[in-house]
Image (cartoon, rainbow, N blue to C red):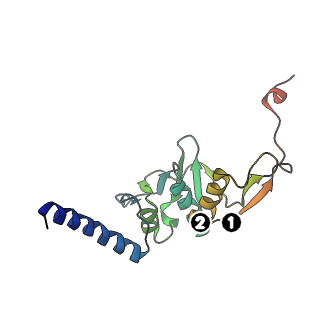
Amino acid sequence: MHWASQNRSGVLDGWANIWRQAKAEGERVRGLDGGVRRVRAHARSYEYTLDSSQAAALTFRLLDRGASLRRDTARNVVSLAARRAPAGLDLLARGLGVDVTPSRRAPEGDPVPLRSLGLLAGAGISTTSGSYGEARYVIEQRWGRTVASVAAATSTPGPRRSEASAP
């Protein structure tokens, strides 16, 4: 056998072994980043940017654990009091690949309530399209929340801008 074919075979065997090991462990590959960064002794809160579906998943999981969260919409940051942070925050954030930063500030912003989630369906909205199915999958499988289909005909929109600003 030629050395090049042996080398190619060895590389392929190496990748096959890595694949078999990952498949046997049943784990999806997650980002290597995430978790609580440099815990400070005088941290008053923990903060993370709400910039991904993984950050939303962390938010829902913390709410499910009874954490009192606040969202500062100006900075797009979610914060929680350090003294009331649930056990395993670092492990949970690391598993989702979300960077959580200790802060000396008190938690800021509006309280984040645990609400029911709904997806619009009905006339003009295809429930068989990729976007609807993908959204439902992320909400139910990744975020661990239940979702209800809301008929578009029963939802009440607010006034249009042109109507609201009319004299």
* Figure label count: 2
User: Split into 4 quadrants, where in the image is the C terminus?
Assistant: top right
Q: Which circle, 1 or 2, is nearer the viewer?
A: 2
**Which image quadrant for residue 140?**
bottom right
Q: Going by the image, does 155 lie left or right of 12?
A: right
Q: Residue furthest top?
A: 167
**In the structure shown, which secondary structural element does the residue marked by tag 2 occupy?**
helix
Residue 69 in the image: state x and y as whole percent. Answer: 58, 58
**In the structure shown, which secondary structural element does the residue marked by tag 1 occupy?**
loop
**Which image quadrant for residue 66?**
bottom right
**Image disc number at residue 35:** none
Q: Which residue is mark 1?
A: 146
Residue 49 in the image: state x and y as whole percent. Answer: 49, 49
Looking at the rendered structure, the kind of residue marked 1 is: Thr
Q: Going by the image, does 111 lie left or right of 47?
A: right
Q: Going by the image, does 147 lie left or right of 167?
A: left
In 3D space, how far apart are the residues under numbered discs 1 and 2 (Cα atoms)?
Answer: 9 Å
* Residue located 52% across and 55% down the image: 55
Residue 131 in the image: state x and y as whole percent. Answer: 64, 50
How many residues crowd mark 1 within 10 Å: few (<14), some (14–19), many (20+)? few
* Residue located 63% across and 52% down the image: 130
Of residues 69 and 123, the one nearer the viewer is 123
* Residue located 81% across and 33% down the image: 160
* Residue located 17% across and 66% down the image: 6
**Which image quadrant for residue 93?**
bottom left
Q: Going by the image, does 15 lie left or right of 99?
A: left
**Image disc number at residue 141:** 2
How many residues crowd mark 2 within 10 Å: few (<14), some (14–19), many (20+)? few
Sequence order check, earlier mark of 1 and 2: 2
Looking at the rendered structure, the kind of residue marked 2 is: Gln
**Is residue 68 depicted above or below 73 in this figure?**
below
Q: Are marks 1 and 2 in contact (CB under 8 Å)?
A: no
